[in-house]
Image: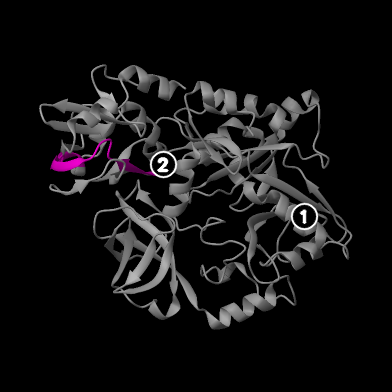
């Protein structure tokens, strides 16, 4: 059973978003890491990159497969988790915490409201 | 999607499944990397029942194999096997196969899952002048690959009367214990009577066996093996691919295909040009003379993992593409095989374009491990 955190927002592409003031923290869900298998490589954007909603901001790779990462909302990258570049396995062991990927300053904070609730996301992966 | 008789057992073991040529197969159980390393260091078992088995039988069987197969077979003794290709007239590879000589009139062929029909139809269409019957035994046989440095010793303990450890590499034999245990219960017997065959072959680069048994008793035999061999690990097709790639073995559809002849992939050692004739010979000879392309191995210098289809560059020249790539579980780095234009074959300074960026790679000989 994949873990879903109640207070987060979710995208159809299996990313989670945590809004903290005017910063949004983004990572991939437990379901996503479990489907990929052991993650051995992660590619992240540069701080300062301005990215549209649904554009590719990076990629995670397991031995077997590559999965692009899509921006759940538009925004400017303010920080990337450099720890996971050297320890990508943290994405498997702690997808909602140490395995976070990027912090962004959303172009429109209200965009985050349009994302899926935890219940809606649960329906998506159970569907 | 098609399922092997082990699907339910594997589902209960929480395997991750993937569509492989229309078959719903385990890609890994818990962890691809652990499965890979376990096969390198100890012993693993793979369900490869999606693979095909075709038998050629008749007075002209040997002559027919000689005409359709690229490699030499005239020197094979009963029970010996050889790897090679079925090529079309243009030299393209219909499939790469291991052919086992059972006796002068019978040859047993292990065929890739995605090519079973193509091979069967192609053999049939070329058989008119020969006294040979082509039997597709794919639905009859399931197949288990037991691989790793401990495989021979452990499997020999399971079948003490068959002297499994005496089977030489690239040879096949009957498993008498299984035959006497299961023969009377089989609702269908194999038309040739060889219900239980074991070959000292594999696709991991480790020692081990491939076991051909009737699908209807595959689950019983599988459960017996995984319960009686201590420390054996069920492995998925994911590690099968990384194991073969670390050894530089070609995969049909990647390094060779109907469009990619075996000369491009530097596999001439499996083509016997001294034979008077075989299908595709003339085309393969002209490819061998011109040699416009070559297969290379490489490792990543910059961070990244090469994947099939990535383009290979030398400065601004696009010189080829990656045929297979992965993150090597044994080496902990990205490795790949690629086809490049021959004129660049001596150049060391090459890059692979991964997503938007060109990443430096270094040429490496393969097997990589």
Q: Nearer the viewer, residue B53 or A52?
A: A52
Q: Specify the farthest residue to the bottom.
A: B289
- Within the image, what quadrant is residue B356 found in? bottom left
Q: Can you say which quadrant of the picture contains the N terminus of chain B?
A: top right
For the point 88% across and 66% down, the residue is B129
Residue B151 position, x and y percent, is: 51, 39
Mark 1 Cα within 10 Å, few/some/many (few <14, many 20+)? few
The residue tagged with tag 1: helix, strand or loop? Answer: helix
How many discs mark residues in the rendered view? Answer: 2
- Within the image, what quadrant is residue B145 found in? top right
Q: Nearer the viewer, residue B187 or B284?
A: B284
Q: Is residue B303 magenta?
A: no
For the point 33% across and 36% down, the residue is A38
Q: Is residue B179 left or right of residue B37?
A: right
For the point 64% across and 29% down, the residue is B5
Name the chain under label 2: B
Dot 2 or dot 1: first in sequence order is 2
Residue B321 position, x and y percent, is: 42, 65
Mark 2 Cα within 10 Å, few/some/many (few <14, many 20+)? many
Vertical side of B64 occupied by B80: above or below: above
- Within the image, what quadrant is residue A59 found in? top left
Is residue B112 in view?
Answer: no
Q: Is residue A83 magenta?
A: yes
Q: Are marks 2 and 1 on the same chain?
A: yes
Q: Which residues are magenta?
A: A64-84
Residue A102 position, x and y percent, is: 18, 38
Q: Is residue B41 left or right of residue B268?
A: left
Residue B315 position, x and y percent, is: 29, 74
Q: Which residue is mark 2?
A: B36
What's the mark number on residue B51? none
């Amino acid at each position: 059973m994949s873990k879903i955190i109640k207070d987060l927002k979710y995208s159809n592409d299996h990313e989670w978003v945590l809004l903290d003031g005017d910063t949004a923290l983004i990572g991939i869900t437990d379901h996503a890491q479990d489907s990929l298998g052991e993650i051995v490589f992660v590619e992240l954007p540069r701080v300062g990159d301005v990215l549209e909603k649904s554009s590719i901001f990076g990629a995670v790779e397991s031995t077997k497969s590559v999965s692009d990462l899509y921006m759940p909302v538009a925004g400017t990258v303010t920080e990337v988790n450099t720890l996971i570049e050297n320890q990508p396995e943290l994405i498997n062991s702690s997808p909602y915490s140490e395995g976070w990927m990027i912090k962004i300053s959303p172009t429109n904070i209200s965009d985050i409201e349009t994302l899926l609730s935890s219940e809606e996301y649960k329906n998506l992966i159970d569907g | 999607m098609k399922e092997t008789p082990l699907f339910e057992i594997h589902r209960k073991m929480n395997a991750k499944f993937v569509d492989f040529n229309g078959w719903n197969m385990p890609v890994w159980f818990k962890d691809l990397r652990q499965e890979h390393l376990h096969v390198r260091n100890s012993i693993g078992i793979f369900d490869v029942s999606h693979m095909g088995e075709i038998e050629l039988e008749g007075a002209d069987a040997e002559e027919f194999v000689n005409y359709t197969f690229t490699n030499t077979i005239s020197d094979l003794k009963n029970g010996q096997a050889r790897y090679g290709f079925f090529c079309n007239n243009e030299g393209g590879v219909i499939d790469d196969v291991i052919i086992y000589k059972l006796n002068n009139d019978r040859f047993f062929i292990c065929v890739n899952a995605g090519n079973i029909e193509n091979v069967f139809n192609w053999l049939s269409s070329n058989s008119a002048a020969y006294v040979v019957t082509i039997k597709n035994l794919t639905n009859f046989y399931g197949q288990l690959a037991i691989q790793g440095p401990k495989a021979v010793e452990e499997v020999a303990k399971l079948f003490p009367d068959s002297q499994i450890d005496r089977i030489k590499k690239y040879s096949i034999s009957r498993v008498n214990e299984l035959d006497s245990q299961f023969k009377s219960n089989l609702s269908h017997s194999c038309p040739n009577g060889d219900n239980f065959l074991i070959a000292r072959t594999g696709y991991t680069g480790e020692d081990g066996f491939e076991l051909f048994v009737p699908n209807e008793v595959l689950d019983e035999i599988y459960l017996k093996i995984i319960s009686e061999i201590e420390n054996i690990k069920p492995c998925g097709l994911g590690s099968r691919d990384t194991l073969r790639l670390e050894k530089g073995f070609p995969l049909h559809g990647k390094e060779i295909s109907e469009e990619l002849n075996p000369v491009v992939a530097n596999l001439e050692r499996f083509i016997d040009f001294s034979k008077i004739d075989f299908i595709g010979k003339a085309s393969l000879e002209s490819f061998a003379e011109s040699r416009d392309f070559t297969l290379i191995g490489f490792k990543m210098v910059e961070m990244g993992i090469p994947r099939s289809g990535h383009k290979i560059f030398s400065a601004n020249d696009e010189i080829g593409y990656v045929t297979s790539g992965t993150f090597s579980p044994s080496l902990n780095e990205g490795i790949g095989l690629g086809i490049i234009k021959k004129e660049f074959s001596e150049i060391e300074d090459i890059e692979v374009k991964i997503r938007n960026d060109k990443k430096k790679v270094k040429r490496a000989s393969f097997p990589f491990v």
